[in-house]
Amino acid sequence: MEQQRARIIGIARHRLSTDGEGVTTLVAFHDCPLGCRYCLNPHSLGDGARFREYSPEELYAETRIDELYFVATNGGVTFGGGEPALRQQFISEFRRLCGPAWRLNLETSLNVPKANVEALLPVANSLIIDIKDMNPDIYRSYTGRSNDHVLDNLRLIARAGRQSDCLIRIPLIPGYNSDADRQTSRRALEALGFDRFDLFTYQIRIH
Amino acid sequence: MARGKPTCKILKEIRRQIAAANDIEFITSECRYKGDCPGTCPKCEAEVRYLEEQLRARSLSGKAVALAGISAGMMLMSCGNGTPAAQPGPASQSDTAGPAPQSAITATVADSVKDTIPDNVKEGELPPATDDAAVKKDNARDEAAPVMMVGEVVDPEQTPFFDINSVDVPPQFPGGQEGLYEWINSHMTYPQSALDAGIKGKVIVQFIIRKDGSITDAKVVRHKSPDLDAEALRIVSTLPKFSPAQVAGTPVDCRYNLPITFKPSDQPTTH
């Protein structure tokens, strides 16, 4: 298999139910297709040369230190970013290395080609999906991109019957959407069979 | 209170549960470390390695090892921790699956780790700083820092302020730009040495206008001469509070560049 390497902007251990069930280690990839104004990790954008490049083997070796906690708490590794769904081969290889006992979670926007998500569904236990807003105009205004991929991938997940593995985050985005917009988004998602939602308000970070 | 201490306590309880479920003698003590704590330390890590060693020994001797999911309930019961989660909203139905049934698995945990708890490691002792810029822990932020959100990681090189072009409402000097010019002109003393040497021109001072309107981190980013630079900085040090910049109605820290032009024949001005 071709050696996969990826730049990683941060590895945070012992995230207790912050990014998924149990004790998790958050691994944040560099690079994202979106340009969200209130991006929590703006260093995931632009030049990533200052960040270390990892192979799946190197990342596994580094995260394995917490395997005991992962297995005991049904935890594992949450891949975020940036956009982790751009790294389907890397994550698939990581799954091969860590085996089935670790939970692998994706914290994703789903704004990637459908083939990426098709490749990731078999290796990910759960997906934390930040859908921004289901309204295409609001989405484009906030992210600078279309949400066509997002909608395609939500339908793909629904067809695969994986809705219960997804936590859909529906943010209130100051200056971009309203609570009524969020309810509209929620209804559209419920129509696709999703039923786990996290309604929250974006925090404005200094950067 | 170090923000990692709650994390430390939860992880320690998980270790206790693992030991109890596998009849492993596990003697630990209350951490007495008073400094900042990332939730783990060499003493804690050594306890993990000890448990791994004991579990491996059990497995090699043919005994069952209970590990998978035995502490899953810990996360559901714990409330505070060092890396608080974004709390689900009122409509959240994000409850995850309950604790997995206990099962016996073959211990494959860190087979290569053979350390035992070293005597020379003190509780709370922090590991040496890594030179790996990608590895950051939540305690990299100070106590006043906001809680971590889902998926958020700390950038050590993060510039802790907004650029003036990216805010909704720019910072405002009392009396506006005119008031700022008047303040500078009325508070400036043209250095005699610069006058004598015929030095004139523009000095640009950069500073942060904090969310409370105060000015910090002033520095000269365009130099002219030591005397003019010093005078420009002195003037900035006299400025009263601004009204802070805002993003989406929230005051934010904002970087501001103030050009100050020195003209020997005139009063110094800004533009």
Image: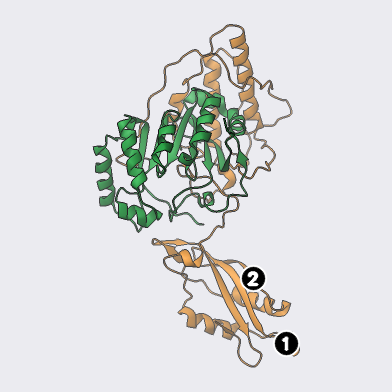
Chain colours: A green, B orange
Q: Which of B37/A104 is in front?
A: A104
Q: Which of A21/B21 is in front?
A: A21
Q: Residue at x 61, y 26 (%)?
A: B29
User: At which x and y percent is residue A158?
Assistant: 31, 33
Q: Quadrant of residue B78?
A: top left
Pick whichever of labels 2 and 1 is earlier in the sequence.
1
Q: Residue furthest front?
A: A2
User: At which x and y percent is residue B143?
Assistant: 55, 48
Give me the chain letter of mark 2: B
Looking at the rendered image, the quarter that the C terminus of chain B falls into is bottom right
Q: Amino acid at mark 1?
A: Gln
Secondary-structure class at tag 2? strand
Can you identify the residue that label 2 sits on? B221
Q: Are marks 2 and 1 on the same chain?
A: yes
Position above or below: A138 against B234: above
Give me the chain letter of mark 1: B
Query: From where the camera sits, is residue A199 visible?
Result: no
Identify the disc placed on residue B192.
Answer: 1
- Graded by Cα atoms within 10 Å as few (under 14), some (14 to 19) or many (20 or more), the crowding at tag 2 reads some
User: At which x and y percent is residue B201?
Assistant: 65, 83
Q: Which of A82/B77 is in front?
A: A82
